[in-house]
Image (tube, rainbow, N blue to C red):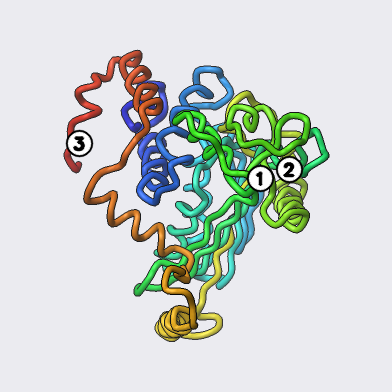
């Protein structure tokens, strides 16, 4: 992916962080935001809707906050700079918040929140996206999947929530379509606002929010935070032909030392995990702490490799060949540099 982006004129450091964000998602079994999403970025660059060489600009800044303009650039480099600035500020202020607007899709929010937690801080992020979510009976999108992510630092376990506010992400719908699989009931509506299990009808229609109207309300709140509050568009105002569209992004960092020592937080988290896992339950039912499944996936895929569906690999190979990157290179180990 790095080689592909560089061949499209993306600066080396921007290409590196974009590829890293995509592989992060694949390693955690968030395949909808991995390599396949990166290939959509390629489409956006070719269409001229994504700026491969953005000039990231500070719009407004205080000791504890910063607002960036992403110059229509690839989302990961803009979001990464935002996170770096927020982490730099939180060390002296205890709480810091940053926002970015005029950028394209940032990928998995957990990538950025995990950077905050690795620095020893509590992290949270919200973003809005092009409207694709509706409710039964409404033949129009209302809000985007508008994801949220929250991470709590701990050297003993990964505690990280990263989820879209739709029952399934748009990327998952596309993944099912690529594999020729039906989607489960309760994921989507067709263009007439009726339930469907066809991924093709879902692509033409709308996704369903988690928790019905409560999920829709939460998505609206994210829409307002990542739109009007920072001067970005709301989901219904976001334009673009591909799934790489984005409205705005907010990232929050909190120093847990404001409340107690990090060691005490870590021990309390372990006690919490032991408590919930000790509850009486069916032997076939497991209580999962946010982040556990992703951690397990990282372990497995780090050993076995990252699987790509045939369509994604075919697209990857075709784009690589068009840019003069041999397919042999794609299937060969890349040495650490």
SS type, badge 1: loop
> Picture coordinates of residue 30 (x, y %)?
44, 47
Residue in view at x 39 percent, y 51 percent? 28
- The alpha-carbon separation of the residues under discs 3 and 1 comes to 35 Å
Residue tagged 1: 128
Which quadrant holds residue 136?
top right
Q: Earlier in the sequence, mark 3 or mark 1?
A: 1
Question: Can residue 262 be seen in this snapshot?
Answer: no
Q: Relative to 337, is 88 above or below?
A: below
Q: Out of 200 and 158, give the one closest to the viewer.
A: 200
Q: Which comes sooner in the sequence, label 2 or label 1?
A: 1
The N terminus lies in which quarter of the figure?
Answer: top left
Percent across and percent down for residue 185 are 62, 44
> Which residue lies under the disc numbered 3?
334
Q: Which quarter of the image is occupied by the C terminus?
A: top left
Q: Which residue is mark 2?
A: 143
Q: Are marks 3 and 1 in contact (CB under 8 Å)?
A: no
Seen as rendered, the residue at the extreme right is 137
Q: Is disc 1 surrounded by few (<14), some (14 to 19) or many (20+) residues within 10 Å?
A: many
The answer to whether 147 appears left or right of 36 in the picture is: right
- The reply to whether dot 2 and dot 1 touch (C-beta < 8 Å) is yes
Q: Residue at x 47, y 84 (%)?
A: 275
């Amino acid at each position: 992916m790095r080689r592909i982006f560089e061949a499209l004129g993306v600066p080396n450091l921007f290409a590196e962080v974009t590829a890293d964000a995509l592989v992060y998602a694949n390693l955690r079994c968030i395949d909808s935001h991995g390599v396949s999403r990166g290939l959509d970025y390629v489409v956006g660059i070719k269409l001229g809707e994504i700026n491969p060489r953005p000039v990231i600009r500070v719009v407004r800044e205080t000791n504890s906050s910063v607002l960036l303009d992403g110059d229509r650039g690839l989302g990961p480099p803009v979001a990464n700079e935002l996170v770096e600035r927020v982490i730099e500020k939180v060390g002296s202020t205890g709480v810091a918040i940053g926002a970015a607007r005029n950028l394209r899709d940032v990928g998995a929010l957990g990538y950025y929140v995990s950077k905050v937690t690795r620095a020893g801080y509590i992290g949270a992020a919200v973003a809005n996206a092009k409207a694709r979510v509706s409710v039964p009976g409404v033949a129009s999108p209302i809000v985007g999947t508008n994801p949220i992510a929250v991470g709590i630092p701990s050297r003993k376990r990964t505690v990280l929530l990263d989820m879209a506010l739709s029952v399934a992400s748009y990327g998952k719908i596309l993944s099912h379509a690529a594999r020729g699989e039906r989607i489960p009931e309760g994921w989507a509506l067709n263009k007439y606002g009726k339930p469907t299990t066809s991924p093709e009808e879902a692509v033409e229609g709308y996704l369903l929010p988690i928790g019905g109207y409560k999920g829709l309300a939460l998505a609206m709140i994210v829409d307002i935070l990542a739109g009007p509050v920072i001067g970005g568009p709301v989901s219904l105002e976001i334009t673009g032909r591909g799934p790489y569209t984005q409205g705005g992004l907010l990232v929050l960092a909190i120093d847990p030392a404001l409340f107690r020592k990090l060691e005490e937080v870590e021990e309390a988290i372990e006690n919490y995990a032991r408590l919930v896992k000790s509850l009486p339950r069916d032997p076939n039912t497991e209580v999962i702490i946010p982040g556990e499944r992703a951690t397990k996936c990282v372990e497995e895929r780090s050993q076995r490799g990252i699987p790509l569906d045939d369509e994604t690999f075919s697209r990857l190979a075709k784009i690589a060949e068009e840019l003069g990157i041999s397919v042999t290179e794609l299937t060969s180990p890349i040495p650490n540099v």
